[in-house]
Amino acid sequence: MTATSRRDKAAETESALKEAAKRVFARKGYLNTKITDITKEADRAAGSFYNHFASKEELLVALLADLAEAGDRQAAGEDHLSDFSDPAAVRWHVRQYWDFYRTNAATMLALRQAAMVNDDFAASYASFGAAQASDIESHLAHVTAAGLPLPASPRLTIAMMYQLIDNFAQMWLLQPHPAGWTPPTDDEAVEALTRFVYRGFTGRDY
């Protein structure tokens, strides 16, 4: 086997393990998943896991990197809007995050669970969130340039936006729905969040 073939095979196995992990996390949850569950799901030898990851947490760090890369690709698209004084730009980011969360719901839950039980991973997860937030901090410059006062510093304002959207998505896309509550459609959730966030940024409705 050539060096290129070995690299391709290793990359294929790593990808298979990550995809298998996401499926098992969706069924069993992160805390109840064993490494052997992942290798069995991936149809790989039990020991193959350690050729790529030292632990479940290290696999999650790799998944976190994949999520960051996916987010970067979204932001690089021609339809990306960055002027947060325009509700359309706020809606674009809310929609991207909501759809992203729905697509990656099982992984997002696994990340939360791992952060609760592993301090090192919790630090990595927090750094990931801070990096994602800082990437769009500059979008608020359009709000202040329009003469509109932010509710707090740009960094805190973005942090509040992320916490609002993240917790709302967790409530409706991960957790059992509250008894007697009707889940919003995707469009209803995006529009409600957009209106709430835009009002928080600018102090006005649209």
Image (spheres, rainbow, N blue to C red):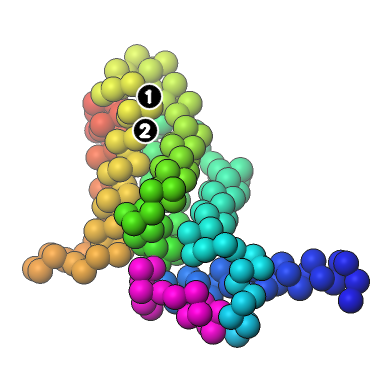
Q: Quadrant of residue 150?
A: top left
Query: Where is residue 144 shown, x and y percent of the image?
Result: 38, 18
CB-based contact (under 8 Å), mark 1 and mark 2: yes
Query: Where is residue 135 shown, x and y percent of the image?
Result: 51, 34
Q: Amino acid at mark 2?
A: Ile
For the point 38% across and 54% down, which residue is it? 118
**Residue 13 vertical placement versus 84 (above, below):** below
Region in magenta: 27-42
Tell which of 74 and 109 is nearer to you: 109
**Residue 87 vertical placement versus 32 (above, below):** above
**Residue 65 vertical placement versus 109 (above, below):** above
In which quadrant of the rendered image does the C terminus lie? top left
Q: Amino acid at mark 1?
A: Pro
**Cα distance, mark 1 to mark 2?**
6 Å
Q: Quadrant of residue 179?
A: bottom left
Q: Which mark is residue 158?
A: 2
Alpha-carbon neighbours of circle 1 within 10 Å: few (<14), some, or many (≥20)?
some
In which quadrant of the rendered image does the N terminus lie? bottom right
Instruction: Quickly name the residue at label 1.
Output: 154
Number of numbered labels in the structure image = 2
Tell which of 61 and 157 is nearer to you: 61
